[in-house]
Image (cartoon, helix red, strand yellow):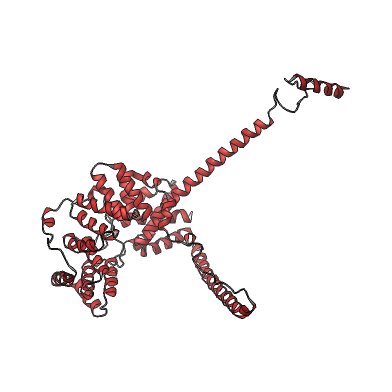
């Protein structure tokens, strides 16, 4: 029961995270929470629902805690809400001048000055703090990504601009700058940078997808679709290109093609937003169509490591190498022994902690586990919940298929057994009729004559 309630709670918490808005966490209204809780409990008994409500009440203080940041996900009920209207004015404002490598530093510098003069005080302070500590383009790029993940849009863009200024020839810094500009609402500023990169790397799926994203943000769907198509021709597993391509297909009235794009996007990069898009399109049955064997490609766990992921050193095949061989063997033995000891210590500590928590009772177990999960709700944990949902469907279908296969095999064996033990006129061996105390007759007269003699002997 603990596992069931915990899984349902994770799913419930995951759905609440969709209601978080940028840039500050905002708790969904109580009516929405009650609605989502009812949805999560629809298959439970009355007693289980009462227990679930009690547990949710216990975790509400942690859920309402505004001190921590939660991942921001768009709240939408229709996929069409994600497709922006065509912005003719902003499209017309895109610079007609083609950027050259020599222009990159000044281009990034102009954008930097605009944000620094008009940006929020807290964001500007963050940029100045980071800039005094790091100066390399790679470090500034990492800082911009970290700022993005922590919910600081202006700081993320500004630090990416500093990265380009620091190393104008760094194409990764240029691409990150363009991607952040598009993400935070300035695709018209991103397109000149992306066009420059496209001319230099015409077959790079990331650059092509980013151009598609920029045009998509401006509502120019024909141009966006062209670049998305190019992106996943080069990289058939590109999830962003797939899902945006699906949105365009759905808007244009091709729901089957849209669903196909969404499913392939989920199989390549499972996540809560794509799951929401697929659910809006196909309802609760959408995830049933996902091929878990394809989804495994996106999951990094030890079961899917290649067999040769660790190289075992080769030993020599002569006496002179004996000492060296023994040294290698002893070294590996020591390494494995120490590793085993560390694993046992960590396992004992984890088991002890779990036992102590379990002894507090089922309600305390689920509540404490849920509170810990709330503190860590982010893109990774919500993605794990999404994968877990798909895995549960896969396991249920797999077990049903096995049960059906077992029943088919059992019926086939029973039919064969009946056929093998059935007697008849053409049997090769005589059957004895115990009722009449005689062997059954044969259709073949020669065989019948032969057995008639045997029957006579038998009777005598």
Tell which residue pokes out farthest to the right in this image. Answer: 460
Query: How many marks do you count on the picture?
Result: 0
Residue 415 percent location from the top left of the image: 62, 33
- Name which quarter of the figure residue 231 lies in: bottom left
Residue 82 visible: no
Residue 339 in sight in this render = yes
Q: Along the line of sight, which residue is nearer the eye, 27 or 446?
A: 446
- Please state if 92 lies on the left or on the right of 165 as rendered: left
Is 386 on the left or on the right of 420, as rendered? left
Q: In which quadrant is the C terminus drawn? A: top right
Left or right? Give the position of 123 relative to 63. Answer: left
Write the residue at 16% across / 60% down.
188
Quadrant for residue 182, please give it: bottom left
207, 79: nearer the viewer: 207
Quadrant in the picture for residue 209: bottom left
Up-down: is 33 above or below 434?
below
How far from the left and from the top, in percent, is residue 101? 19, 69
In the depicted structure, whether residue 366 falls above or below residue 152: above
Quick one: 361 or 353, which is closer to the camera? Answer: 353
- Is 4 or 336 nearer to us in this picture? 336
Seen at 19% across and 62% down, the residue is 190
Q: Position of residue 271 (x, y in %)?
A: 35, 56
Image position, residue 168 (x, y; %) = 21, 72
């Amino acid at each position: 029961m603990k596992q069931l309630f915990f899984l349902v709670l994770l799913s419930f918490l995951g759905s609440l995270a969709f209601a978080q808005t940028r840039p500050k966490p905002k708790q969904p209204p109580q009516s929405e929470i009650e609605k989502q809780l009812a949805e999560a409990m629809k298959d439970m008994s009355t007693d289980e629902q009462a227990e679930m409500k009690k547990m949710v009440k216990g975790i509400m203080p942690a859920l309402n805690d505004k001190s921590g940041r939660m991942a921001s996900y768009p709240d939408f009920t229709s996929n069409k809400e994600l497709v922006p209207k065509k912005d003719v004015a902003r499209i017309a404002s895109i610079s007609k001048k083609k950027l050259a490598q020599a222009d990159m530093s000044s281009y990034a510098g102009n954008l930097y000055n605009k944000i620094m003069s008009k940006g929020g005080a807290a964001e500007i302070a963050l940029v100045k703090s980071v800039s005094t500590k790091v100066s390399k383009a790679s470090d500034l790029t990492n800082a911009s990504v970290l700022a993005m993940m922590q919910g600081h849009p202006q700081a993320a863009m500004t630090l990416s601009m500093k990265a380009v200024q620091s190393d104008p020839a760094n194409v990764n810094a240029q691409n990150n700058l363009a991607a952040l500009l598009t993400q935070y609402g300035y695709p018209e500023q991103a397109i000149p940078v992306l066009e420059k990169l496209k001319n230099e790397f015409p077959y790079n799926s990331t650059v092509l997808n980013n151009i598609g994203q920029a045009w998509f943000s401006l509502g120019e769907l024909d141009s966006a679709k062209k670049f998305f198509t190019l992106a996943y021709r080069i990289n058939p597993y590109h999830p962003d290109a797939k899902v945006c391509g699906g949105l365009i297909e759905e808007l244009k009235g091709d729901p089957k093609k849209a669903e196909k794009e969404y499913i392939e996007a989920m199989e390549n990069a499972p996540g809560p937003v794509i799951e929401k898009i697929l659910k809006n399109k196909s309802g609760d049955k959408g995830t049933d169509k996902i091929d878990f064997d394809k989804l495994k490609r996106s999951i990094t766990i030890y079961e899917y490591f290649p067999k040769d992921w660790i190289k075992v050193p080769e030993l020599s095949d002569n006496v002179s190498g004996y000492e060296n061989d023994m040294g290698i063997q002893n070294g590996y033995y020591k390494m494995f022994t120490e590793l085993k000891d560390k694993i046992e210590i960590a396992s004992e500590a984890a088991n002890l902690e779990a036992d102590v928590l379990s002894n507090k009772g089922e309600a305390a177990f689920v509540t404490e586990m849920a509170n810990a999960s709330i503190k860590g709700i982010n893109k990774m944990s919500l993605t794990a919940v999404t994968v877990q949902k798909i895995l549960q469907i896969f396991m249920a279908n797999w077990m049903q298929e096995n049960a059906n296969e077992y029943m088919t095999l059992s019926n086939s064996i029973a039919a064969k057994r009946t056929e093998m033990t059935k007697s008849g006129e053409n049997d090769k061996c005589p059957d004895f009729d115990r009722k009449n105390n005689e062997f059954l007759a044969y259709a073949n007269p020669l065989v019948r004559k032969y057995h008639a003699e045997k029957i006579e002997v038998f009777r005598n």
